[in-house]
Amino acid sequence: GAVVSQHPSWVICKSGTSVKIECRSLDFQATTMFWYRQFPKQSLMLMATSNEGSKATYEQGVEKDKFLINHASLTLSTLTVTSAHPEDSSFYICSAPTRQEGTDTQYFGPGTRLTVL
Amino acid sequence: GENVEQHPSTLSVQEGDSAVIKCTYSDSASNYFPWYKQELGKGPQLIIDIRSNVGEKKDQRIAVTLNKTAKHFSLHITETQPEDSAVYFCAASINAGNMLTFGGGTRLMVKP
């Protein structure tokens, strides 16, 4: 299947600092990527849709000024958690749809674990 | 919007037995139903998916069935092995290029 990578795989930061998470499609181009958040022992919840060359679309209840998304190229989307607080500690996962052999499929990255002290 | 319910939340089976996980969805416009396996600390891994134009799909020990009329779909794993132990998520979407709505997850434990 297609490969989606994330960097870093984990990060620990102090409260009030900003953290940037990268999501890359390694072997395909993605005009759209999705960012999900997963709290321990819970399901994945969509945060926002990242669109290459335009503004991201945020889900209800997700603060766009706190979770900045930039999709500057067809293979890279970044999520910046600004002024992070302990309640932002979570597992952040991106996904990207692609077409392979005429079939559309969506692949996920390995996730980034954010811990805010 | 779409709402996906998944049952059971935990499932324990003996190695070699079958495991069945069921999901229901609410939006009749949904046409794409993937299943993901998530191991601890890792991202979800696509294991099988089905689209609304078929009722069943099989890949070795894994099969998925879809009943669009009743708005439910199920994952069947036969001859379970300890390495099948993980959390499984169902999801629904209009198509594979769109946002996914996930079920609550099922923690499958396969006892040797």
Image: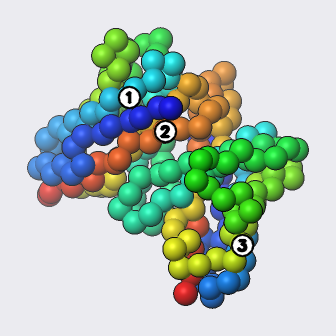
Name the chain under label 2: B
Question: Which residue in the protein does label 2 denote?
Answer: B101
How crowded is the residue under tag 1: few (<14 C-alpha within 10 Å), some, or many (20+)?
A: many
Q: Chain of mark 3?
A: A
- Tag 2 and tag 1 share a subunit: yes
Residues tagged by mark 3 and mark 1 found on one chain of the structure: no
Q: Is residue B28 above or below residue A100?
A: above
What is the distance, in whole Å, between disc 3 and disc 2 at their CAs? 26 Å
Color scheme of the displayed model: rainbow
Q: Is residue A12 left or right of residue B42?
A: right
How many numbered marks have been drawn onto this rendered protein structure?
A: 3
Q: Judge by depth and name the residue closer to the eye, B67 or B38.
A: B67
- Residue at the spot 27% in from the left edge and 33% down from the top edge: B22
B11 over A17 or under it: above or below: above
Circle 2 SS class: strand
Name the quadrant of the C terminus of chain A: bottom right
Instruction: Pick whichever, B7 or A28, lies toward us.
Output: B7
| Disc 3 residue type (three-letter) | Thr
Residue B68 place in picture, x, y as percent: 38, 15
Mark 2–mark 1 contact, CB under 8 Å? yes
Q: Is residue A116 visible?
A: yes
Q: Quadrant of residue A49?
A: top right
Q: Between residues A27 and A58, which one lies in front from this camera angle?
A: A58
The residue at which mark 3 appears reads as A82
Q: Secondary structure at mark 1?
A: strand
Task: State the residue at coordinates (70%, 83%).
Answer: A17
Q: Chain of mark 1?
A: B
Q: Which mark is residue A15?
A: none
> Residue B45, percent across and down?
48, 48
Q: Quadrant of the N terminus of chain A?
A: top right
Q: Is residue A114 left or right of residue A50?
A: left
Q: What's the residue type where badge 1 is placed?
A: Tyr
